[in-house]
Image (cartoon, rainbow, N blue to C red):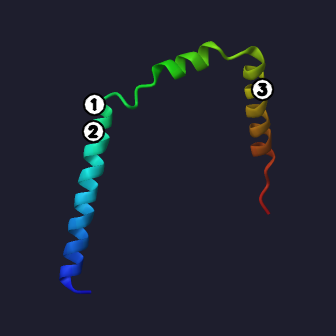
Amino acid sequence: MDSWIIAMMLGVSLFLGAIALFGFLWAVRNGQFDDEKKFLNAAKFDGEEELNDAQKQEEKKERLKNNYRPE
């Protein structure tokens, strides 16, 4: 490969990386990732049946993991 192709690819990748970093920082500053209500509502409105189902699924996963014997 010619060195100008490598330099062009490096320049384009740095430019695109800078755009992505700028977009991420903009989103953080504007509160795009703040979703406190969703977490609080999910914890507040979980019923007993959903919690018991989640516990049973975790126990089943642990049993399967403990009984797994690779050949």
**Residue 28: x %, y % from top left:** 32, 33
**Real-space Cα distance between discs 2 and 1?**
6 Å
Q: Do the residues labelled 1 and 3 touch (CB within 8 Å)?
A: no
Q: Mark 3 points at which residue?
A: 53
Q: What residue lies at 30% left-to-right and 50% top-to-bottom? A: 20
The answer to whether residue 14 is left or right of residue 46 is left
Q: How crowded is mark 2: few (under 14 residues within 10 Å), some or many (20 or more)?
A: few
| Secondary structure found at label 3 | helix
Q: Is residue 59 left or right of residue 35?
A: right
Q: How far apart are marks 1 and 3 (CA)?
A: 38 Å
Say which quarter of the image contains residue 51. top right
- Residue under circle 1? 29
In this picture, residue 3 sits left or right of residue 53: left
Give whichever of 26, 14 is nearer the camera.
Answer: 26
Mark 1 or mark 3: whose residue is earlier in sequence: 1
Q: Which residue is drawn at 79% across and 54% down?
A: 69
Q: Is residue 37 above or below residue 59?
A: above
- Report if the CB atoms under discs 3 and 2 are less than 8 Å apart: no
Task: Tell me the kind of residue under disc 2.
Answer: Leu
Instruction: Please state the horizontal and vertical placement of residue 70, each as a whole percent of the image.
Output: 77, 59
The residue beneath circle 2 is 25
- Report the amino acid beneath label 3: Asp
Q: Which residue lies furthest to the top in this view?
A: 44
x and y percentages locating residue 66 in the rendered image? 77, 43
For marks 1 and 3, give the one nearer the viewer: 1
- Taking 7 as reference, is 37 above or below it? above
Q: In which quarter of the image is residue 29?
A: top left
Q: Which of 37 and 63 is in front in this view?
A: 37
Helix, strand or loop at label 1? It is helix
Dots 2 and 1: beta carbons under 8 Å?
yes
Name the element at disc 2: helix
